[in-house]
Image (tube, rainbow, N blue to C red):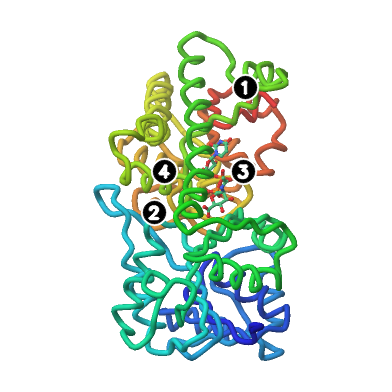
Amino acid sequence: MLFKTVSVVGLGYIGLPTAAVLASRGLQVIGIDVSQHAVDTINQGKIHIVEPDLDIVVRSVVSTGNLRATLIPEPADAFMIAVPTPFKQDHQPDLSYIKTAAETIAPVLQPGNLVILESTSPVGATEQLAGWLAQYRPDLSFPQQAGEQADINVAHCPERVLPGHVLQELVSNDRIIGGMTPRCAERAIELYQTFVRGECFVTDNRTAEMAKLTENASRDVGIAFANELSIICDKLKINVWELIKLANRHPRVDILNPGPGVGGHCIAVDPWFIVSSAPEEARLIRTAREVNDSKPGYVIAQVVKAADQFKKPVIACLGLAFKADIDDLRESPALQIVQQLAGKNVGELIAVEPNIKQVPESLADKGVVHMSLHDALEHANIVLVLVDHKQFKAVDKLLLAAKVVIDTRGLSSN
Ligand code: SAJ
C-alpha cells in the first residue's frame, strides 16, 4: 500500500522540517504537537523555530493544504514520532515523551499502519514503544507478538540532520532503517523514498538505535581528544591549532577542533545513552563526556586568571550560541561560561551575539550588557572568543593587538 496520509508527532527541530518535506512531495501530512502556540503558528504558515528556508517550505505546504497542525490525533497511514529524548538528573534516558506519543496515537491506530520512531533513543526504545502501543491497543497485533503477520509495523529510523542544514540533509543524507521485522523495514523504506535521495540501509531496530548513538559518541570522543590536546598544549606552551593543522597533514589523521565545550542537545546527550546501557564497558565514551563537560570550567579559570592582571577588567565575550552562525543557545557552553563568570564578579562583562536581539534574562539580570562587536572591542581589555561566528572570523587582528585574547575557537590562528 502506498502512503497517502502521514502523521508526524512532535513538530520541533526534526518533526516540522520532516512534515514539511513530506507535504512538499504531495502527501497529506497531519502534524501533532502538544503546544497550542506551535500548532497555531504552523497553521498560519509560519514557524516557531529557527532553521534556514524552513519558513518558505512551511508557508507553501500550509497554503496548498498538504500540511495541517493539530493538538488532536487523527487516523493516518503512517505515524512518525519525533519527540525529545533528554536524560534525567542521573544521566538515565527519559523516554516519557515517547510514552506520551504512544498514548496519543494509540486510539487512532488502524490495521496496516506503520509507526516510525525517529527520536534518538537508547537501545531497546523501539521495542518499548511497541510494548506501550500493544498495552494501549490490545485489539491490535504488533511485531513483538505476531512478527510479519502483525497488524501494525514498527521501525526505528533515526534522524541525523545537522541543525542549520536540515532541509538539505533531510533529503541528501543516507538513512538507517531499523525494522522490527524485514516487512517493517520494507514499508519504512517505501515512505522514506518519497523524499530521501540518499541511500536507505536496512537493519534491525536495535542496531539502528545504536548506530545513531555511535555517530554522536564518535564525534564526542573526537572532540574530547581535541579538547584534551588543547589543555596539554597550553601547559607545554604549544599552539594547539598549528599542531592540529600539522598533524592533519598525515593521510590517516583527522583531528577535530577544540572549543569551549560541547553544546547542543545531541552530542552532549546521546553518548550517555550508551553509558547507561553498558556502564562498566563504556569507559572511553564516559570519559570523553567528562572531558568535554569539564572544558567550560577550564575556560572560566583562564578568564579569572587574566582578569587578575587588570584593575578594571572589561571582558568582551564573543558568542553565546552553541556553535557558529546559529542563534540556538540551548545547552550552549558559551552561555554557560558567561553565566558562571557573571556569578563570579570577575569584572565588567559584555556579550556579543549577532544572531540574537537581546541577551537572555539570566545574563541581563546579572548585569551582562549586549553590545555590537565594534563597541565591545573598543571597550574591552580582555577578549574571550567563544563561538566562531562569521562576523568574528572577519575581525581585523590589529584591533586585538593590545588586548588579552582567550581564543577557545582558534580564530586568531586561522
Ligand atoms: N564542536 C567542537 N569541535 C568540533 C566540532 C564540534 O567543539 O570539531 C562542538 C560544537 O561547537 C557544538 C557541538 O560540538 O558545541 C556539537 O556541534 P556539531 O556541529 O558537531 O553537531 P550538532 O549537535 O549540531 O549535530 C549533531 C550531528 N551529528 C554528527 O555530526 C555525528 C547531526 O548530524 C545529528 O543529526 C545531530 O547531532 C543530532 O540530532 O543527533
C-alpha span from label 3 to label 1: 24 Å
| Labels 3 and 1: the sequence-earlier one | 1
Q: Residue at x 47, y 48 (%)?
A: 213
Ranked by sequence position, the earlier of labels 4 and 1 is 1
Q: Which residue is mark 3?
A: 373
Q: Are marks 3 and 1 in contact (CB under 8 Å)?
A: no
Q: CA distance from mark 4 to mark 3?
A: 35 Å
Q: Earlier in the sequence, mark 1 or mark 2?
A: 2
Task: Tell me where residue 281 appears, x and y as whole percent.
Answer: 33, 33
Nearer to me, 297 or 4:
4
Earlier-in-chain disc, 4 versus 3? 4
Closer to the camera, 91 or 144?
144
Question: Ligand 1, what quadrant?
Answer: top right
Q: Nearer the viewer, mark 1 or mark 2?
A: 2
Amino acid type of disc 3? Leu
Vertical placement of 37 versus 238: above or below? below
Badge 1: residue crowd in 10 Å (few <14, some 14–19, many ≥20): many
Cα separation between marks 2 and 4? 9 Å
The residue to which callout 4 is attached is: 271
Mark whose residue sits in front, 3 or 2: 2
Nearest to the eye among marks 4 and 1: give it: 4
Q: Amino acid at mark 2?
A: Pro
Query: In the image, residue 227 lies at what x, y percent?
Result: 49, 27
* Residue assigned mark 2: 122
Question: Closer to the camera: disc 2 or disc 4?
Answer: 2
The mark nearer the N terminus, 3 or 2, is 2
**Mark 2 vs 4: CB contact within 8 A:** no
Give the labeled residue for mark 1.
Answer: 241
Q: Secondary structure at mark 4?
A: helix
Quarter the N terminus occupies? bottom right
Q: At x 44% / y 68%, what residue is drawn?
A: 83
Q: Residue at x 51, y 28 (%)?
A: 382
